[in-house]
Image (cartoon, helix red, strand yellow):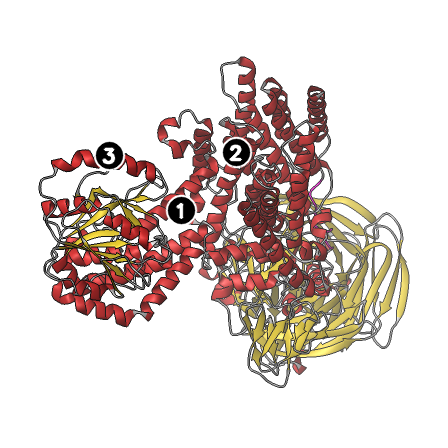
């Protein structure tokens, strides 16, 4: 402050004689006490004012017990204003933490009278800095949110030194006409400084006065009174000032509008991992509700003074919401920064050309969006391994040790993807269609950006690293997976590069934060495809073996901790990983071996870093493809090695296309990479990112439509073509089959739990049917199979059902043979009638009877579970039947939350530490 | 050093690529082997009850167990009865189940290796036919006649869960018959439809009906009325091989050869008699969708049998109609080492014979095991290419076993009535 003030003093001395009649008006200074401010220094600063007649000084507030001579004290600002006599023309309201330059008052008086204004504010500079601007008056939006146009830390180069009308001036230093101040009864004492200034300025303007800022009046502000404009008190103050100032008509729309903006801003901030704004909004609204009576009093008091309409305020207001615009801008910036490593966008579009990563990302992103056009416009296909999500609460209950309703039911844990999808769906307010579509398109984009960022962390900067993401989405393994509708495989591909990237540590990031990120990124990967958790470790080991140094075994190992999410599922159904009989037998096309080997050979001609990336990727790719090609394994492992193959191939492309030059050798690498990318793009050309078309949900909707009192029951699907069966299938005598819920196939049903006695009984029944049983309907009735649907070419079951007596062929599907089983029993029933499915359990009329539930028997059913052959019976005396959560699933759910919390905590702790 | 590692890694990429590309890929998992269709344990019979006509449905089975007979009409069960098959036989009197006139009956037998027959009795009336285990999409009913004093009913039965729709192609000596009742004929589930051919196409000497099931399944039977006697026979699936052992009582009958296809079909008739096997006894051509008669009396020998070989599927039907009564039965499409005859030996007031043909090259030792409480046993040697006809002792049915594959036909006759029926091959 001193340096600038001394310079300014000199300048003032030179300028003063040029101003003819700035003195003469009587001014009373109302020095408002601020906690922690040095009042004596403030009084001294006022006394140093070069102004005649010398202003009279009143300290407002508790103030010191002893004040200098000639200084009076008044506890209340309103009273102090009211007590000012007519021999004073102006009142200078000044905070005790303000240090005006000696000519500050003189400039205010001069410009106020010259501009015929009623209220003038000083230019505020941050005390203790050379020349940092705090305020030169502000515009606002309709909600009073200040918009100064100043950048944080902006230096005063006199760039704003123009006397102009503004929406408001802060209350730190304002000169106001006495008569106006007395009419307005001063500042609202409940409001913090900015809001108080806003309120006073608005009322002054509505009373017919002009509000100006006077940059030549410079005041250094220590900021002891200042709270952030985002502080809840300032927010509350702005709301109160709106209610005080606006007409009822304006308030009718501006208050709901403000509420909506509050909600939108809160949500946007939550996306930025900031919860405080939501709390701040809530407090500000509550504060105003609490103070509503005093606000209305304030409004009544102001009414007689008002002489202008709200239009007078609108003239100085920005359109829309300043807060929302700032948050949106920040959100957009964060999103762009995900792939804008070079901050090219942030630095301006002129530099786009020089940032190859950006145009690579944009091209790849556009291709992903184009490849997902059908999903965007018509929604997700319901076929293969992709089906609608259950309501989030039910799905979460299933994941946390609840009943697995797939097939004929089981206590075995559901696939962890069910839990993850439930959380995402919950965040999307249960809009499952939007959740699936967004997650799918997001996975494609995430793969593109993820591979680009991973390659960037491995030291590549070329355009190919983002295009390589397309190979992860649709490369050798992913194409095979998405071709059969593996939705979770696609999502896992979108997450994998981020998890691997978390094992490549940046020097600037603390170890705590790095481990936190390793855990956080690994959790969704573990939920979607647990075997993929080993890929970061494999990549790191390979990278280090090839001489790379940036990776961390600790981080890669830490990501394995996320396996806790999938432990109950893996323990309950090891066959998903191990049993080859359950796999789909998916193998990459033989062409891919040649493509990857060619790509690996071609990267030999590029620079060392890209060569390392390419060869590491090629090893991962061929290892994954060879495993998929030769080694018998379960469907889980099959999914893992196929995604790994695509991941590796994407690194080959990233390395090969790192630099595009005319150098013939490097051009060979680019051509090889282009070949891989082109072959991959073909797989996503169907508009569904490679997922097959079809809507089994709609095809089987007849079950719900024709449901009777006992509910839609179950549907038995059978075909000789494994891929005709949605999700997993069981091997039958000459065909594949499974049962699905007649009310609609949901994502949790994709994975079939290990066979139980119920499944073995169903299999026996099917054997009888195929052998020529005359009454298959009776055999299938106990399984609540209301419909039998035969898909694909005709087979043995067709022959058997052609000559049977109790399944009614029903032409409901032109491309399938549908049989109605009128003998099917409800899934849950007592002798009095059926019970309804509620959540994961059942409910009905309480009675002294047993409830028969056509699900695999398990003691976890309550109340009073008992076995009835393979099925379950419980007591019906409570009117509800439920399944007790299994301890392993419950503990795993708790442990998962703890791992997530630990990850977040480590990130937060790492960021706090210097 | 680093370069060496990279080179090694590149080599590994090539090796793995070669291994992956050239080694055979793992096979996709397959469903378990399909189970053999054990055959249907159903038996669909054309029955008639009332107006002095009674039907009995005897059951014979290699496995003892419960059996059930349900008479169906109008889309539901008109009545049903349960019985236990003991000692290989049981019997249902339709009069104890429902008096519904002409209807269909569904027998549920203890096992697939079982048989049921429909035996129709009345004053001067005897008709026999083995019930049908499973339907076929195309069958032919040949040999009906609507000349004066004769009536021919086509009985289409649908005991199955789905409604059926059939197309009928009816030919006679006049050619292809045209009648809108023959098009898209609906046979509701659990019901049967009877076409009175004497009303639709009167005055036809020989009627051949080809029934094609367009939707669902039906079982078809023909009922020929002549004087007081009736003949009952079921639709036959066209084939290229037929055996026709001819009982002495119908030695003056005729062999009717009919073709369902719209082209002439050449055939060869081989003759078995006491004089041995005569290949190419007769050759000829069945006109497109036409019919050809062979007079049995023209064949030399006392006990004869025929084998029909044809260039395309056709049906051979044995027809006998004279003052002794009327009987019709289809030729036998296969030879078997085991035959079940449900109710053989149980027809009150009727004489019963079995006619055997050994079309094989070895002498067959034939054994007759009576079923039911009295279980007579008999046996004899049957030379290759020879025909034998023997009388049957009283029983509730018979299991015929042979060391080689043989063909057997059942004939029964009473006062002014005669009946022919085939058996049911089992244990194949």
Is A79 left or right of B351, judged from the image as shown? left
Q: Is residue A498 left or right of residue A577?
A: left
Residue A60: image quadrant is: bottom left
| Image: A474 above or below A755 | above
- The residue located at (26%, 56%) in the rendering is A31
Nearest the camera: A287 or B401? A287
Q: Residue B359 at x, y = what percent?
A: 81, 51
Q: Is residue A155 visible?
A: no
Q: CA distance from mark 1 to mark 3?
A: 69 Å
> Residue A636's spot in the image, x, y percent?
66, 47
* Nearest to viewer (mark 3 / mark 2): 3
Which of marks 1 and 2 precedes in the sequence?
1
Task: Give the chain of mark 3.
Answer: A
Task: Point out which mark residue A142 bears.
Answer: none
Give the quarter of the figure containing the N terminus of chain A: top left
- Main SS of the magenta part reads loop
Mark 1 vs mark 3: tell me if same chain: yes
Checking the image for residue A10, the label placed there is 3
Q: Which residues are magenta?
A: B27-35
For label 2, the residue is: A452
Percent of width and height locating residue B84: 77, 77
């Amino acid at each position: 402050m001193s340096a600038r003030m001394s310079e300014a003093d000199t300048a003032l001395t030179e300028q003063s004689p040029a101003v003819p009649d700035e003195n003469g008006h009587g001014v009373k200074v109302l020095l408002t006490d601020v906690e922690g401010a040095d009042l004596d220094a403030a009084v001294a600063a006022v006394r140093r004012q070069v102004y005649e007649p010398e202003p009279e000084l009143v300290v407002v507030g508790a103030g010191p017990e002893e004040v200098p001579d000639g200084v009076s004290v008044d506890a209340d600002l309103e009273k102090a204003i009211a007590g000012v006599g007519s021999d004073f023309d102006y009142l200078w309201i000044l905070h005790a933490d303000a240090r005006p330059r000696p000519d500050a008052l003189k400039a205010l008086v001069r410009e106020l009278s010259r501009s015929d204004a009623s209220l003038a504010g000083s230019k505020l500079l941050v005390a203790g800095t050379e020349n940092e601007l705090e305020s030169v008056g502000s515009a606002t939006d309709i909600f009073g949110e200040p918009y100064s146009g100043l950048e944080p830390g902006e230096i005063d180069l006199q760039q704003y030194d123009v006397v102009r009308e503004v929406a408001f001036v802060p209350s730190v230093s304002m000169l106001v006409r006495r008569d106006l101040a007395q009419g307005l009864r001063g500042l609202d004492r409940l409001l913090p400084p900015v809001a108080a200034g806003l309120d006073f300025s608005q009322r002054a303007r509505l009373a017919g006065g002009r509000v100006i800022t006077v940059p030549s009046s410079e005041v250094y502000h220590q900021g002891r009174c200042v709270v952030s404009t985002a502080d809840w008190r300032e927010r509350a103050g702005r709301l109160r000032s709106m209610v005080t100032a606006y007409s009822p008509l304006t308030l009718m729309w501006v208050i709901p509008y403000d509420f909506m903006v509050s909600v939108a801003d809160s949500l946007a901030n939550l996306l930025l991992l900031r919860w405080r704004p939501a709390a701040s909004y809530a407090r500000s609204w509550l504060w105003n509700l609490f103070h509503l009576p005093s606000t209305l009093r304030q409004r009544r008091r102001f009414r007689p003074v008002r002489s202008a309409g709200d239009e007078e305020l609108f003239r100085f207001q920005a359109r829309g919401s300043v807060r929302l615009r700032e948050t949106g801008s920040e959100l957009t910036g964060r999103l762009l920064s995900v792939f804008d490593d070079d901050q090219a966008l942030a630095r301006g579009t002129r530099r786009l050309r020089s940032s190859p990563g950006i145009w690579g990302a944009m091209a790849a992103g556009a291709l992903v969006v184009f490849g997902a056009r059908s999903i965007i416009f018509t929604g997700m296909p319901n076929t293969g391994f992709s089906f609608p999500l259950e309501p989030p609460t039910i799905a979460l209950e299933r994941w946390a040790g609840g009943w697995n309703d797939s097939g004929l039911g089981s206590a075995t844990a559901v696939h962890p993807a069910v839990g993850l999808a439930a959380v995402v769906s919950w965040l999307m307010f249960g809009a499952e269609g939007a959740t699936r579509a967004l997650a799918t398109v997001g996975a494609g984009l995430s793969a593109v950006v993820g591979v680009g960022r991973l390659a960037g962390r491995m030291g590549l900067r070329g355009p190919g690293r983002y295009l390589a993401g397309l190979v992860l989405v649709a490369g050798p393994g992913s194409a095979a997976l998405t071709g059969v509708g593996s939705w979770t495989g696609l999502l896992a591909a979108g997450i994998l590069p981020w998890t691997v990237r978390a094992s490549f540590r940046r020097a600037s990031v603390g170890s705590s934060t790095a481990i936190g990120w390793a855990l956080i990124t690994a959790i969704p990967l573990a939920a979607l495809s647990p075997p993929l958790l080993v890929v970061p470790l494999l990549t790191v080991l390979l990278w280090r073996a090839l001489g790379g140094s940036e990776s961390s075994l600790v981080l890669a190992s830490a990501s394995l901790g996320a396996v806790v999410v999938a432990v109950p599922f893996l323990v309950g159904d090891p066959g998903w990983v191990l049993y080859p009989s359950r796999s789909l037998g998916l193998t990459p096309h033989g062409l891919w071996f040649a493509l990857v080997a060619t790509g690996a050979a071609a990267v030999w001609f590029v620079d060392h870093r890209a060569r390392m990336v390419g060869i590491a990727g090629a090893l991962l790719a061929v290892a994954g493809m060879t495993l998929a090609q030769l080694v018998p394994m379960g469907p889980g492992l099959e999914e893992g090695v196929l995604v790994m193959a695509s991941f590796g191939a994407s690194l080959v492309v990233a390395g090969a296309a790192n630099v595009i030059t005319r150098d013939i050798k490097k051009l060979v690498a680019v051509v090889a990479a282009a070949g891989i990318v082109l072959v991959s793009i073909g797989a996503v050309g169907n508009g569904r990112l490679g997922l097959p078309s079809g809507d089994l949900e709609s095809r089987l909707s007849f079950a719900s439509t024709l449901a009777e009192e006992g509910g839609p029951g179950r549907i038995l699907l059978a075909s000789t073509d494994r891929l005709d069966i949605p999700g997993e299938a069981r091997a039958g005598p000459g065909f594949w089959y499974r049962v699905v819920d007649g009310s609609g196939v949901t994502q949790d049903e994709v994975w079939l739990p290990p066979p139980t006695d119920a499944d073995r009984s169903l299999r026996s029944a099917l054997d009888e049917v195929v052998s020529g049983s005359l009454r298959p309907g009776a055999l299938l009735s106990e399984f609540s199979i209301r419909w039998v649907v035969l898909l694909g070419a005709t087979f043995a079951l067709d022959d058997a059902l052609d000559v049977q007596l109790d399944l009614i062929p029903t032409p409901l599907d032109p491309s399938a043979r549908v049989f109605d089983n009128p003998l099917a029993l409800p899934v849950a029933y007592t002798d009095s009638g059926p019970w309804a499915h509620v959540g994961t359990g059942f409910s009905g009329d309480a009675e002294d009877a047993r409830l028969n539930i056509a699900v695999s028997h398990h003691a976890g059913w309550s109340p009073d579970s008992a076995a009835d052959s393979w099925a379950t019976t419980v007591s019906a005396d409570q009117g509800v039947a439920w399944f007790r959560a299994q301890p392993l699933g419950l503990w795993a759910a708790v442990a998962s939350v703890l791992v997530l919390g630990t990850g977040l905590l480590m990130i937060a702790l790492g960021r706090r530490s210097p | 050093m680093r370069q060496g590692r990279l080179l090694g890694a590149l080599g590994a990429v090539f090796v793995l690529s070669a291994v992956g590309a050239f080694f055979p890929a793992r096979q996709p998992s397959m469903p378990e082997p399909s189970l053999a269709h054990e055959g249907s344990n159903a038996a669909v019979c054309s029955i008639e009850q009332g107006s002095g006509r009674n039907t009995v449905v005897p059951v014979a089975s290699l496995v003892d167990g419960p059996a059930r007979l349900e008479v169906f009409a109008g889309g539901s069960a008109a009545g049903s009865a349960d019985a236990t098959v003991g000692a290989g036989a049981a019997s249902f009197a339709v009069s104890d189940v429902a008096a519904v006139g002409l209807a269909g009956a569904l027998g549920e037998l203890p096992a697939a290796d079982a048989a049921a027959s429909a035996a129709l009795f009345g004053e001067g009336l005897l008709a026999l036919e083995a019930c049908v285990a499973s339907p076929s999409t195309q069958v032919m009913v040949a040999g009906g006649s609507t000349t004066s004093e004769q009536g021919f009913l086509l009985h289409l039965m649908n005991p199955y869960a789905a409604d059926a729709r059939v197309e009928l192609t009816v030919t006679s000596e006049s050619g292809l018959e045209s009648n809108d009742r023959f098009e898209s004929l609906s046979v509701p589930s659990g019901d049967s439809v009877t076409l009175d051919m004497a009303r639709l196409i009167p005055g036809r000497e020989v009627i051949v009906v080809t029934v094609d099931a367009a939707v669902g399944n039906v079982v078809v039977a023909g009922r020929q009325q002549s004087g007081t006697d009736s003949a009952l026979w079921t639709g036959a699936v066209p084939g290229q091989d037929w055996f026709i052992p001819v009982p002495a009582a119908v030695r003056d009958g005729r062999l009717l050869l009919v073709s369902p296809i719209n082209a002439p079909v050449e055939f060869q008739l081989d003759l078995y008699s006491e004089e041995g096997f005569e290949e190419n006894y007769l050759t000829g051509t069945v006109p497109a969708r036409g019919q050809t008669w062979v007079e049995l009396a023209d064949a030399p020998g006392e006990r004869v049998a025929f084998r029909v070989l044809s260039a395309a599927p056709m049906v051979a039907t044995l027809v006998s109609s004279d003052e002794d009564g009327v009987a019709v039965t289809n030729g036998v499409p296969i030879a078997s080492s085991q035959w079940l005859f449900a109710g053989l030996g149980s027809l009150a007031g009727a004489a019963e014979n079995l006619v055997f043909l050994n079309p094989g090259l070895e002498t067959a030792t034939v054994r007759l095991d009576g079923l039911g409480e009295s279980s007579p046993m008999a046996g004899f040697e049957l030379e290759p290419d020879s025909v034998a006809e023997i009388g049957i002792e009283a029983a509730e049915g018979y299991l015929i076993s042979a060391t080689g594959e043989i063909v057997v036909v059942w004939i029964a006759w009473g006062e002014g009535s005669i009946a022919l029926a085939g058996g049911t091959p089992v244990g194949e």
